[in-house]
Image (tube, rainbow, N blue to C red):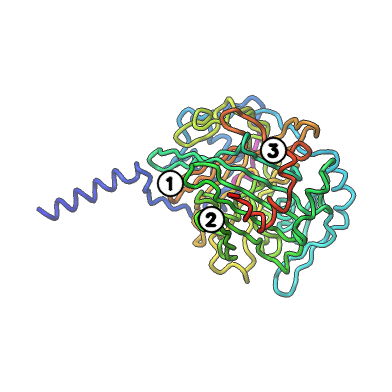
């Protein structure tokens, strides 16, 4: 009798657990390698095409690998039955004239050197896209360098009145919202191409070229928790960014170890090496990449702000953009496999970061991540949007992102547009004067100013 009870319990578990998200699906890297081969023959994707559950397989070669998995429906995270992706024309308007001019002026002198220890060193970079047309040798690394220095604003701020929102979603449908203030900026004047950047907002952290500051505003129990990352010009001397976390209960900040690059940022589904709108937040010293090919990949590049409100603007329970967001564009992209160099790979969480890099602005529009055992783990969408920015012109203006953990059936959604008013982030010359204070928002000492 006891044996039958155990048998029935096991059978029930096999039926129930997959529906709750505890499926034991394991996708091997070989499936992605097959996608690379198959997608080399993309065929035609006419403007006006509507991709749905009924016809998606006709157009799967235009979908990143992780999105194919969503359509296949073998994981807890899967496409809703009413998904619809309306295809529109490709519009190239992400680049300010000043970015193009700097690229044309300096790209021809940029070079790369590989040191005896296997580390990579970039020489003679002065802003813009370092390798607008990457070629061998080191073609993959050059494309990765473009992603590391993508075309985007020099100053980006989500402030209290137009805060960024993060929604954490679990396999039971629970949704928890957090709000954040964010200050991201290029800190080194030699890399600045956007016009009108106030000089007092630059060169505040000697030796760095870029800083990321973020502070949680809600929920109340997490308020004032903050993070600061410093990215150094000399990556051979500083192959890992310096990251500090301010802990309100201790009234002080802690410096994270270099091994913490795999740690979740604020407990979400982005690790520190994920958490940037370009899809790669590591360094170009201890990472390299294989160039897998050129593809036209569908992405939302000119979306409206329906995604500023979650879940109403999304197809649930996945949290996929509704057709009301705008048209999908099959944009030319470089598909690269980013990974640590062999001498630095031991203990690292990812064996591969597959970046689908937009060949206009070079931000990663989609990322597929494989764990240390070469099993499919996460997909992260980065819907990099372009539009009119006051006093600047037409340029990159913001990002919406979804980080889907397929192994643990968890998801995190980010929107940089102030919820629920759909306000835009502050960019460049529009940043309020308060946030130009580099010492406060870009140095470890500035973290000690929190709660004062």
Q: Nearer the viewer, residue 355 or 292?
A: 355
Tell me the CA gap for discs 1 and 2: 28 Å
Q: Nearer the viewer, mark 1 or mark 3?
A: 1
Q: Residue at x 58, y 65 (%)?
A: 257
The x, y position of residue 222, in whole percent, is 49, 47
Q: Which residue matches tag 2?
A: 247
Q: Nearer the viewer, mark 1 or mark 2?
A: 2
Tell me the CA gap for discs 3 and 2: 42 Å
Q: Is residue 320 magenta?
A: no
In contact (CB < 8 Å): disc 3 and disc 2: no
Looking at the image, residue 45 lies above or below residue 33: above
Q: Is residue 38 magenta?
A: yes
Q: Which residue matches tag 1?
A: 409
Can residue 382 be seen here? The reply is yes
What SS does tag 2 mark? strand
State the extent of the magenta-drawn residues as a range. Answer: 37-44
The x, y position of residue 303, in whole percent, is 64, 30
Q: Nearer the viewer, residue 198 or 12?
A: 198
Badge 1 density bin: few <14, some 14–19, many ≥20, Cα 10 Å:
some
Quarter location, residue 92? top right
Q: Nearer the viewer, residue 324 or 227?
A: 227
Badge 3 density bin: few <14, some 14–19, many ≥20, Cα 10 Å:
many
Mark 1 or mark 2, earlier in chain: 2
Looking at the image, residue 317 lies above or below residue 99: above
- State left or right for residue 281 relative to residue 10: right
Q: Which residue matches tag 3?
A: 331
Q: Main secondary structure of the magenta part?
A: loop
What SS does tag 3 mark? strand
Mark 1 or mark 3, earlier in chain: 3
């Amino acid at each position: 009798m006891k044996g039958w009870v155990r048998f029935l319990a096991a059978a029930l578990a096999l039926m129930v657990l997959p529906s709750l998200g505890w499926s034991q699906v394991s996708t091997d890297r070989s499936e992605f390698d097959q996608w690379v081969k198959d997608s080399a023959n993309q065929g035609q994707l006419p403007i006006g095409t509507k991709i749905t559950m009924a016809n998606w397989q006709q157009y799967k070669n235009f979908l990143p690998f992780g999105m194919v998995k969503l359509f296949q429906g073998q994981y807890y995270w899967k496409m809703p039955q009413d998904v619809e992706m309306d295809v529109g024309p490709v519009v190239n308007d992400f680049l300010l004239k000043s970015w193009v001019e700097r690229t044309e002026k300096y790209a021809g002198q940029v070079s790369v050197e590989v040191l005896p220890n296997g580390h990579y060193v970039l020489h003679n970079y002065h802003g813009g896209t370092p390798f607008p047309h990457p070629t061998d040798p080191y073609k993959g690394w050059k494309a990765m360098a473009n992603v590391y220095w993508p075309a985007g604003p020099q100053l980006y701020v989500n402030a209290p009145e137009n805060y960024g929102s993060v929604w954490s979603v679990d396999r039971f449908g629970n949704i928890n919202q957090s709000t954040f203030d964010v200050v991201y900026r290029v800190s080194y004047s030699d890399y600045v191409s956007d016009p009108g950047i106030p000089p007092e907002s630059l060169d505040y952290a000697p030796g760095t070229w870029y800083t990321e500051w973020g502070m949680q505003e809600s929920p109340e129990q997490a308020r004032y928790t903050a993070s600061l990352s410093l990215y150094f010009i000399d990556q051979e001397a500083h192959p890992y960014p310096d990251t500090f976390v301010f802990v309100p209960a201790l009234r002080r900040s802690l410096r994270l170890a270099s091994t913490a690059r795999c740690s979740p940022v604020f407990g979400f589904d982005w690790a520190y090496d994920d958490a940037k709108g370009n899809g790669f937040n590591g360094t170009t010293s201890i990472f390299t990449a294989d160039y897998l090919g050129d593809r036209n990949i569908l992405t939302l590049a000119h979306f409206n702000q329906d995604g500023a409100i979650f879940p109403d603007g999304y197809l649930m329970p996945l949290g996929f953009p509704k057709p009301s967001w705008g048209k999908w564009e099959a944009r030319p992209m470089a598909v690269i496999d980013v990974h640590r160099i062999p001498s630095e790979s031991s203990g690292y969480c990812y064996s591969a970061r597959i970046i689908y890099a937009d060949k206009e602005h070079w931000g990663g529009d989609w990322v597929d991540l494989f764990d240390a055992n070469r099993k499919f783990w996460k997909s992260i969408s980065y819907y990099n949007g372009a539009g009119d920015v006051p006093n600047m012109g037409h340029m990159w203006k913001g990002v919406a992102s979804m980080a889907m953990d397929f192994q643990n059936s968890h998801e995190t959604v980010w929107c940089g547009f102030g919820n629920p008013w759909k306000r835009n982030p502050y960019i460049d010359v529009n940043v309020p004067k308060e946030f130009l204070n580099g010492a406060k928002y870009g140095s470890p000492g500035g973290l000690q100013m929190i709660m004062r």
